[in-house]
Amino acid sequence: MKIAIIGTGYVGLPTGVGLAELGNEVVCVDKDEAKINALSSGKLTIFEDGLAELFEKNVQNGRIKFTTQMKEAVAPADIVMIAVGTPPHPFTKEADMQYIHAAAYELAEYLTDYTVVAVKSTVPVGTGDDVEAIIRKVNPTADFDVISLPEFLREGFAIHDFFNPDRIVVGANTDKAREVMKKLYQPFENKTQFLFVKRRSSETIKYASNAFLAMKIHYINEMANFCEKSGADIKEVAQGMGLDSRIGKKFLNPGPGYGGSCFPKDTNAMAQMAKKYGVHLNLIETTIAKNDERKAEMAERILSHLSDRNHGRVAVLGLAFKGGTDDCRESPAMDIVRDMLKVNKNICVYDPKALDNARKLLIEKVDYATDIYQACKDAEVVAVLTEWEDFRNIDFVKLKHEVLCSNIVDLRNIINQEEAIKNGFNYYCIGQTSQN
């Protein structure tokens, strides 16, 4: 099939590469000329584990192409997927719909034969109605259907999730559109669950799912706080909880709070949407507030291990919101660094993949290191904020020669505790009474 994808970010690009790998002809369109030039020349503009090989393969065989021209992408397409950003409004926290609406206005001009317009971005309930109205206004004779096609790709695992989906949800109000999507996803028949629902139900599913997972993270963090005071071990508690099939083991890893491009944005948007309908989602609202508080608490926890909280050297390992991606948007690590900078400017940071993005977002002055051990030189405390595999394999003997004081604050519970203590480090993690 011929597919046009509007937007080449963390959703659009992995989706386009995945669809090309399935044998479709994909054209990705973006207004950023520099980005399109880079992609067309075979240079990836994001880091996503497993993406590079498939990207290179499908660029070379011509199954995926890139353009700044909407007409080139849309006119021949059987399906047009909108995968542009819906960032939160800085004040209301509602999803900003300007890019969705702009895409709808522009693509409408170039619809020719019957086309399915799939909104893949995470959007408020009723967006499909708005997109449909825009297209009909611009191109009254167009033959099309607008559907909701929520994405469930985890950053860092997007390629894996594309080819191994838990479910494929399609919000379509016509049988014709459903048949087109069945054809597109035919390679996944008998491999996953298909759910065809009303368009507004589909738009809600994405928000409801992300809000629930955010609440699950907040819950396990509260249990971790309890374990620290009571003498229980959160790893053992989470393991016992996860064996209950009604609960499941996923998203029971305690940490510095949830973050990333989805959970903060989507929980806020869900709460704001509910208020418009006169519904108060108290659980979600509490989760949002307490998650913000937690990051400030984690910053204070790190600073508390300095001999001088205003001037002692802090080494930060990890800036991406999670391992496997270079995305620093709404990263708990970035927020924690910003909180520490309010009282301490003596911070050195390192991340295996996200330093360039961090520099763009972290306006305050910090020192940047090129490896773990450079970051930890003369540090009084080493803070692990992102769960990169590199940090699981630290050479503690080498690290011991670099640090000024032997304090490790592991906010991801990934360091080998026994090895750290054996090599003379004071080890502090989440959800355990300190054992040093």
Image (cartoon, helix red, strand yellow):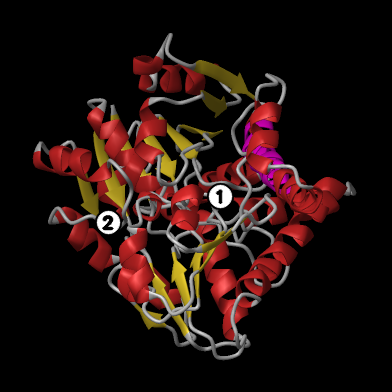
Of circles 1 and 2, the one toward us is 2
Where residue 165 appears, as percent x and y from the top left, is 45, 26
Describe residue 369's horizontal placement relative to residue 229 as left or right: left
Residue corresponding to mark 1: 134
Quarter of the image with the C terminus is bottom right
Q: Residue furthest left?
A: 60
As measured in the structure, the alpha-carbon distance from the residue carrying label 1 to the one carrying label 2 is 20 Å
Q: In the rendered image, is residue 206 in sight? A: yes
Describe residue 436's horizontal placement relative to residue 41 as left or right: right
Q: Residue at the location (34% across, 31% down)? A: 78
Q: Residue at the location (9% across, 41% down)? A: 60
Q: Examine the structure image and report whether residue 318 is included in the region drawn in magenta.
A: no
Q: Residue at the location (81% across, 48% down)? A: 230
1 or 2: tag closer to the N-terminus? 2
Where residue 109 appears, as percent x and y from the top left, is 40, 50
- Assess disc 1: are there few (<14), some (14-19) or many (≥20) residues with their C-alpha within 10 Å of its C-alpha: some
Quarter of the image with the N terminus is top left
The magenta segment = 200-218
Residue corresponding to mark 2: 69
The amino acid type of the residue labelled 1 equals: Ile
Q: Nearer the viewer, residue 357 or 404?
A: 404
Q: Nearer the viewer, residue 311 or 165?
A: 311
The amino acid type of the residue labelled 2 equals: Gln
